[in-house]
Amino acid sequence: MIAVAEQTETNEPVERIGFITIVDVPELGYAGGMLVVSPVGRPIEFHCTPPVRENRTQKILYGQTYRGFLFCDQIAASIVEKSKSRPQLLITDRSALLALDKITDLPVAMLCSLDQTENRVSGFEVGGEQVISHTENPQLLQRVKSACLEFTKSLPLVEPFERIQLAIEEAQSVAR
Amino acid sequence: MAYLGAPAGGFAGLSEQNFVEQNFAPPAVARKNMDNAIPLIDWQNSIGQETSVSVDSVTTDLAVVSPAVLSATFRKRRPKVSSYFFSETGVQEKDPRALPNGPANFFQPVDGNPGDIVIDPTASASPRHDVKQHQVTKDDKRTHLKAPKDVIKMGDRLFYMLQPPLESLLSGETMEFPFPPFDFQYEGVGFLFTRYNAILADEMGLGKTMQAITSMRMLLRTRQATSILLICPKPLVTNWLREFKTWAPEVTVAAIQGNKSERAWHWKHNKAMVKVANYELLIRDEAIVTDADRTYDLCVLDEAQRVKNKQNSTSKVVQRINRNRSWALTGTPIENSINDLVGICEFASPGSVNQNMTVREIKRNVKDLILRRTKDIVMTDMPPRLMRDAELDLSQEQSDRYRAAENDGVIQLGEMGDEITINHVFELVLRLKQICNFDPVTEKSTKVDRLKADLEEVAASGQKAIVFSQWVGAIERISDQVQQFNPLQYHGRIASKRRDPILQEFKENPDRTVLLMSYGAGSVGLNLQFCRYVFLFDRWWNPAIEDQAINRAHRIGATGSVTITRMIMAGTIEQRIHDILEEKRELFNEILSPDTQPINRGLSRDEIFGLFDLTTPKGKIMNPAA
């Protein structure tokens, strides 16, 4: 499922989709990864961070917002800044990264599970999955929907996250 | 109440009260600094955030004692980001040897920008076979490319790993297949495609040809290869041409053939993407093939066991072919001993192993080089292979002749003393095996009698059978005696150009019930999966060759169970060889398993001597099967 938040309006077809996620690396922390792909899934860019450990002090001080700060402000924002090709749409599977729309002017969509859909007010179905969104901008929603439909002709939306996971595992195996 | 240094998201959920309740203990360094009074305003400034904090209790304390001040600075210490950009020119800081073209070129249609690639003008006339498109789902099988171990740089490794799954790549508009590949075939394609050095050692019948052609096709599509040389046994050249037409109709393929000047033209001027040559002509065209100015992007050896002896002339030639990638295809990487594998590696990955290495070292060094799957593992839904041993008794005439020949032969061998060689023993074995097939005087044969009875059943059920023998003479005799089944012959005395029509006739003419083949001509590369019966009229020395023969029928596409009948004359040399081969076959199945050490297989010199309880010049040899 997809929940959409944000922003940009344009009629141009989406040619670069950024799949961005945070991967839990056991005992080491959280690593971020973003794979920018073409509408048929071909890689254009890949960015990843080393695992970042949770900081106990910050965790106490930030309280419940800490995860959002770590995932979004620290890790994901760093990654998005590095992108050269500039994706036209960000898709994530981490709810914390929906806040990326506060940092970038890119539309951000989230792949979420059924139990996360209760409060979503609008959406669409793509690739046999129910898709919902936060956005109240119908044009933006249509743009995201079109991009997702185009992409799922080749691959399911969850697939790029598998590649990110594999790539981060590979990077970690080398680092060790 | 807001807290110091609160980020954009705020500190929701962390009230002053629960802040205190968490018994925040300043770290040691901070405690040490508490002795130095720091004005509250500096504390706030050091954090660099506006704040509306009201810390009344602290302010009160300031007036009384030295303030306990905790300084905390919140900086956005962002993690280092590693970035990899895939563009027209490939990954940045690329390894020039390992790096393929950039993804922008990945899987573009060949006719999109042909460059120096020649497009077959007839390709468009070939029937289009589209894999049935289906709606992708998250549950679909996905095979991701893996970087081989010899690709070192992280960017290059990620280049492979970050490609879309093979299933997606190969089902795109630019790649068409007559049939959807099996999952393990995708894995095989992924294995070959990413490697410069590889041995695909799948058991016969699992589609090595298709996997190799698809991998070659991908290399051509991605411009990682523009010239490929494929070398195979002569009888298989037409088979490869046919398979290319089926699996990669747009790829131009040229068979190197004709007289010397014609071949020279093909070698030098034919612009086909793939050139197919046979092992035999390599020797004759050695000077051209090994020309230092000619480099192939890929050289593929089919039935690579042909180069298992790295000292033979064919091996020496293939080792000298200039090439960037080396792939070996074989169903039997180890026919007789681990040295066979060493010989193949001398082509596929020169220097990776040698004969002085221990088995453990060899296994370690070839681990990333070889991919082997068996039907038992990957084709669990394949029709069964039913083995039955027909233990027959010699006819009275055969028995008399056999005993006499054996006794005389053993006596003669014994009398040779130190002059005896292994060839003398071979001669006797062959003589006795021939008597097991046919009585040399009357030409009567218990085996043929049994064969005829079985063929009656085969013909009555509308099925077809293949009969294997090691001798052309035996095949001709069998043919004479089974004329009622309209036999066809396929062996070394049949001219190459006549062989394909024979197979076509056998396949298409329902009156042709039986095909008589020699192990040498018919054991490799042929697709005869429409046959449900295989007869091994006599036994080959090596179980791997027998398996290859059997797998002409028992392979992908087999529509039903395949029954294999091994004819064995009880109490004869055949029985003794059979017993040894069975032991070898069991060992063979273990050799390439990851947890078992390779063991010598086939009949060794000592085992051959042992068949007759003979002694070598250096002492008595025990028959291990006894």
Image: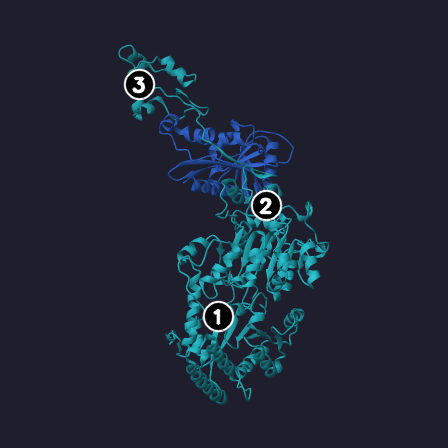
Chain colours: A blue, B cyan
Q: Position of residue B621 (x, y in %)?
A: 38, 75
Chain of the residue under the numbered disc 1 shown in the image: B
Q: Position of residue A27 (x, y in %)?
A: 37, 38
Q: Are marks 2 and 3 on the same chain?
A: no
Q: Is residue B180 visible?
A: no
Q: Find the residue positioned furthest to the front.
A: B418
Tell me where residue B593 sits by quadrant.
bottom left
Q: Position of residue B21 (x, y in %)?
A: 30, 25
Front-most of A153 and B318? B318
Chain of the residue under the numbered disc 3 shown in the image: B
Other residues around mark 1 within 10 Å, as few (<14) / some (14–19) / many (≥20): some
Upstream in the sequence, badge 1 or badge 3? 3
**Could you tell me how far apart the alpha carbons at marks 1 and 3 are, in whole angstroms?**
83 Å
Chain of the residue under the numbered disc 2 shown in the image: A
**Could you tell me how far apart the alpha carbons at marks 2 and 3 are, in whole angstroms?**
60 Å
Q: Amino acid at mark 1?
A: Asn
Q: Is disc 2 placed on a helix, strand or loop?
A: loop
Q: Is residue B113 visible?
A: yes
Vertical relation: B606 (above or below) A62: below
Q: Can you tell which of label 1 and label 2 is closer to the viewer?
A: 1
Q: Amino acid at mark 3?
A: Asn
Residue B33: numbered disc: 3
Reading the image, the residue beneath label 2 is A154
Reading the image, the residue beneath label 1 is B542
Vertical relation: B257 (above or below) B135: below
Is residue A32 toward the left or the right of residue B244 in the image? left
Q: Amino acid at mark 2?
A: Ser
